[in-house]
Amino acid sequence: MDTKEQFEQVMKECRDLFAKKLHDYGAAWRIMRPSSVTDQIYIKANRIRSIEVKGVAMVDEGIYSEFMAIVNYGIVGLIQLELGYADQEDLIPDEALALYDKYAGATLDLMLKKNHDYDEAWRGMRVSSYTDLILMKLYRTKQIESLNGKTLVSEGIDANYMDMINYSVFGLIKLKYGE
């Protein structure tokens, strides 16, 4: 499989999980402000780093499921940036999945462009480096949020969410398919 096929396969797993949670919980995440989504991604990335450093997880969910959560929360963040947060659940599953697909596709397009320019450099990286890059993107995102999105030269929150999604997918690909 090439990178695009591996990316699509991993994203299909993430989407399937998202759809199942949408069934169980509805779109309850619609009440989250983007900054809360950022913090939720931070919790997941920090847990990955903790497991990587300690070498053991005390809760029966490993790094793979946390990278999947970052992918899904990253897409939730992109949706929230577009729609704004709601005071109550306001999307039916089909609408939420259509928005999921829109942002999954945009993220894939971005990855393909960057992957072309960087010539698959991500394949030579360690999974732990993806974790560190995600954490760095989170700190950048928090700073942009503190500035109310008013940056001088930096990309916006949406670009950071997409990068976090892509780094997570790279981690998932390496964990699933190996080097």
Image (cartoon, grey):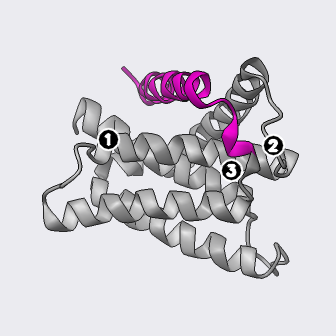
N-terminal label among 1 and 2: 1
Front position among marks 1 and 2: 2
By secondary structure, the bulk of the magenta-drawn segment is best described as: helix
Query: At 76% across and 64% down in the image, what residue appears?
Result: 156
Which residue corresponds to mark 1? 64
Query: At 29% across and 40% down in the image, what residue appears?
Result: 174
- The quarter of the picture where the C terminus appears is top left
Q: Secondary structure at mark 2?
A: loop
Residue 35, by quadrant, is bottom right
- Disc 1 residue type (three-letter): Tyr
Residue closer to the observer: 175 or 125? 175
Which residue corresponds to mark 2? 88
Examine the structure image and report whether residue 3 is included in the region drawn in magenta: yes
* Numbered circles on residues, count: 3
**How many neighbours does mark 2 have within 10 angstroms: few (below 14), some (14-19), or many (20 or more)?**
few
Which residue corresponds to mark 3? 77
Query: At 38% across and 65% down in the image, what residue appears?
Result: 46
Q: Picture coordinates of residue 68 (x, y %)?
A: 44, 40
- Given contact means CB atoms under 8 Å apart, are the residues at marks 3 and 1 in contact? no
Kindly report the distance in space between the C-alpha atoms of the residues bearing marks 1 and 2: 30 Å
- Disc 3 residue type (three-letter): Gly
User: What residue span does the magenta drawing correspond to?
Assistant: 1-30
Q: Picture coordinates of residue 167 (x, y %)?
A: 46, 50
**How many neighbours does mark 1 have within 10 angstroms: few (below 14), some (14-19), or many (20 or more)?**
some
Q: Secondary structure at mark 1?
A: helix
- The quarter of the picture where the N terminus appears is top left
Q: Secondary structure at mark 3?
A: helix
